Structure formats: C-alpha cells, structure tokens
Amino acid sequence: MNTIDTICAICTGTGGAISIIRISGTDALRTGAAIWQGCRELGHRTARQMLFGSSAGDPALAVYMPGPNSYTGDDVVEIHCHGGALAARRVLDAALANGARLAEPGEFTLRAFLNEKLDLVQAEAVGDIISAHSQMALNLAERQIAGRLSEKVSAMRGELVQLLAEVESRLDFGDEHLDWMPPDDIVLRLGDVLACGQELAATFDTGIILREGIRVVLAGRPNAGKSSLLNLLLGQDRAIVSQIPGTTRDTIEESAHLRGIPVRLTDTAGIRHADDYVERLGIDRSRSSIGTAQVVIWLLDASTAAPETEVLEMQTACAHPDRVIAAWNKIDLAGDRSLPQTEVATVRISVTENFGIDELLDRFEKMVWGKTHAEEPEVAVNARHQCLLKEASGALSEAISHTVDGCWELTAAALRQGITALGGITGETVDPDILENIFSKFCIGK
Ligand SMILES: Nc1nc2c(ncn2[C@@H]2O[C@H](COP(=O)(O)OP(=O)(O)OP(=O)(O)O)[C@@H](O)[C@H]2O)c(=O)[nH]1
Ligand SMILES: [Mg+2]
C-alpha cells in the first residue's frame, strides 16, 4: 500500500442525515481547497475551524486539521455534506478528480499507526469498536484504545530489554569482573514476565466471547415455551406464540445481549416425532442448531402429564450435557409437584409470570464465565496477540533454562526472540503483510 498518496473516502455509513468525506495526505489542503468554496479560505489561519460554504454544488461544511494533530497524523480536510449516496459521491468524485485516490479499507487508521498516533493494539481496537455488539465489548475496546493492553505488553518487553542488556554485558565483558546480577535473580525476573505473558494469553477466551458473541439455542419439545422465552429475552414480540404444539416451524435468529454477553439467540421448532414433511425439516434444523450451539437452554414443560418424556428427549438430543441448562417452564402451573432429576444445571421458571429468569441468567453467566456477576475484563487479547504471546512464552522458557545452564549466548538469542514477538503485538516489529492483513478487515473510510 502506497503511504505517500493523498487518500479520500466517504467515512459515514449510508442512510444518515449528513455524510463526511475525509481527505488525508500531503496534498489534502490543496485538494480540499479545490473542491470547496466559502467566504473564508481553508488554510492555516482557519485550521480546526468549521467553515460554511459549498462543495460539488451543494451546501457543505469544511474543516482543515493540519498534521500531526489529526486522526491520521497527516494533513486532513473533512467535508460534511448532505446525507444520501449522491451528494457524498459527488464530493468524493471531485476529490478524486483533484489528485486524491480512494482509500483502501482501514487506510486512514493504517496511516495513524505509521505516524505513531496509535500502536498496533490500539489500531486493532478501533476495528473492535466498530464491530462491538455489547456494552462490555465496547468498554473493552475503549480500554484497549486507552492503552491498557499496550502498557502491559510494553512493560514486559521493557523488562526483557533490560535483562538482555545484562546478559549481553556478560558476553561483551566476559573477562572482566563486573558487578553482574546473580543468575537466580535473572531467572526470577524472567519467570515473572513469563507468568504475566501466560496470564495475558489466557484472556483470549474472554476476548473471543466479547468480540464474536455466543450462539445460544432455545430448544425443547413443542409447546414448552421456547418462543415465549425468546420474546422475553429480546424484550419484543419476535416469534409467534400459541398453545398449538408445533407453532414454530423454522429456526428464528436474533442478536441480543444477556448479562452484557453478546449472543446470537436461536428459537427452534419443538422436537417430537412428526409425520408432517415441513415440520420434519424444521426439526432437522433444530437438531443441527443444538449441535453447533455453545449454550443450549432446554425448556421442559413442568405442567405436562409426562415430565419424564421431557427429560428423556433432552438427554437424547443433547450430546454435550455440559453446554445445557435445563429450565422447567410453566412452574406456575406445576404447584409444588416434584419433577424428575436431570443430569444438567437446572432451574425452575415461568416465562409468563417472569419468574426465575434471573436465576436462569445466573446459570448462563456461570456457564460462560465460570462464575456469576463476573467483573468486566480489564484486557482481553485477540488470536494474533495470543499467538505472539505463546511465541514469547516459548522463548522465555528457553531463556530460563539457558540461564540456569549459564549458556549466555543462547539466553541472549532467546531473549531477542521474546522481545521481537512482544514487539509484534504493539507493532514495533511487524511484517508489512501482517499490517495489510489487519487493516484490510476494517471498513473503507476508517
Ligand atoms: N402458564 C404458562 N404458560 C406458558 C408459559 N410459557 C409459555 N406458556 C404458554 O405455552 C404455550 C406455548 O408457548 P410457545 O412459546 O409458543 O411454545 P414453544 O415451545 O415455542 O412451542 P412450539 O413453537 O410449538 O415448539 C403458549 O400458550 C404460551 O402462552 C409459562 O411459563 N406459564
Ligand atoms: Mg415456538
């Protein structure tokens, strides 16, 4: 990707009342001035002031932000025009005709990274903010932009750089008797960095849940109350509810968050022996949803004449009992009837009376995080970070055993490998191909 060109793109999504066209690069001011006209000129005297005028024949506001105090760190001009595809497209075409080229996905943020406005971890968090589906995921991305993860990684790297200097001084001045750090101390300090790296790598599981969400399937026999529960959890009348067994025939999917955890909720057709061809197709879909679910909430009808059949159906359909929460529903109709035991986590609820739903969500939270009312994670690494942390951990384990053996050259080599791996996380040492891969996942205009 050429990083010298002046680039431009429509930065806002479609459908809004205004559109913003961003131009960034050494020629941004010249291009901006050529396509925008107003009483006051865009330039250093009006820098960072919003000016009123017109662009491509329509009224438009414009602002000039000289580098390095701009998002990208380069000179930036932004033109705010009427929303809708056409007005923005006309301004964009004018910018393209006046020397700018269309930005690639994520290219503005790539420039910000190259101009050291953000490190790589912070730049990735910009992408996370755009795709965040829950408040918790958004908070996590904001903490990452604020530098919480970068600070931890930089502190680890800084410690390794210090220890490398110590080890290298032994290599350089091997014959002289300098006041060296005892090997035991080096091992101890390396052990601390190693533990820190392993702790960070373990936050990946949390990260994937918050970034990608969890597939939750509502399953059970017909009429158990699956669609009623879907509607309750969504807070809207999404699925048809009726007392006729077999009401839901196809799977219904919606996004939501439960206790701050982003979820993809799937309501399914009730499972039973069916003669009807279409119902059988629906039940096949239910079974395949259950197979790929990360959490199954299986509704059991507590008012039925044959509660054992409900439990048996659940046990037959769910191959992974550790992913299942059983909910005896319609408990309002069951009185203090004793219900059969199940092999999985079980709660008693009534969807229509809104009873037991908190306990159900407690169970859900416990299944996802391992505990209820979990605190928000301070940081959570992504797959790329985890891979580099593992590489660093491997190198540190080697460095520790070489230190114990007194093989200082090998210790130094392992330490350098660890430093490079950690530098790859924040972007101090990173391959251009990897950069391109990271930023290409962004949308155009970001
Ligand atoms: N009394 C009582 N009725 C409930 C409760 N939950 C659901 N129902 C009723 O049970 C009937 C079936 O509810 P649905 O939500 O359609 O059940 P379903 O599991 O989606 O059924 P299918 O789509 O046919 O598989 C409806 O008449 C609901 O009003 C409950 O907690 N108590
Ligand atoms: Mg239903």
Image: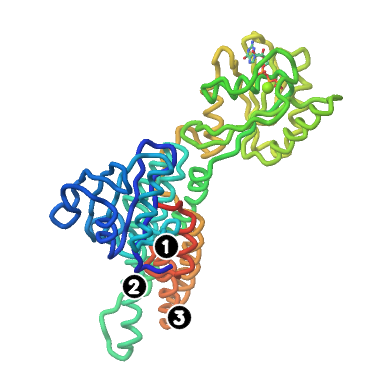
Mark 3: amino acid: Leu
Question: Which residue lies at the image location 38% right of the left edge and 56% below the top edge?
Answer: 123
The earlier-in-sequence mark between 2 and 3 is 2
Query: Where residue 175 appears, x then y in whole percent?
Result: 31, 91
Mark 2: amino acid: Leu
Residue at label 1?
Answer: 425
- Between 353 and 89, the one lying in front of the other is 89
Density class for disc 2 (Cα within 10 Å; few <14, some 14-19, many ≥20) is many
Question: Do tag 1 and tag 2 residues touch (Cβ < 8 Å)?
Answer: no
Residue 410 image label:
3
- Between 176 and 116, the one lying in front of the other is 116
Q: Residue furthest left?
A: 45
Residue at label 2?
Answer: 163
Visible in this render: residue 43?
yes
Q: Residue furthest right?
A: 275
User: In the image, is residue 319 above or below residue 400?
Assistant: above
Drawn side of residue 53 relative to residue 107, left or right: left
The earlier-in-sequence mark between 1 and 2 is 2
Question: Which residue lies at the image location 84% right of the left edge and 25% below the top edge?
Answer: 276
Mark 1: amino acid: Ile
Give the SS element for disc 1.
Answer: helix
Give the SS element for disc 2.
Answer: helix
Ligand 1 placement by image quarter: top right
Question: Do tag 2 and tag 3 residues touch (Cβ < 8 Å)?
Answer: no
Tell me the distance, in whole angstroms, between the alpha carbons under discs 1 and 2.
20 Å
Frontmost of labels 1 and 2 is 1
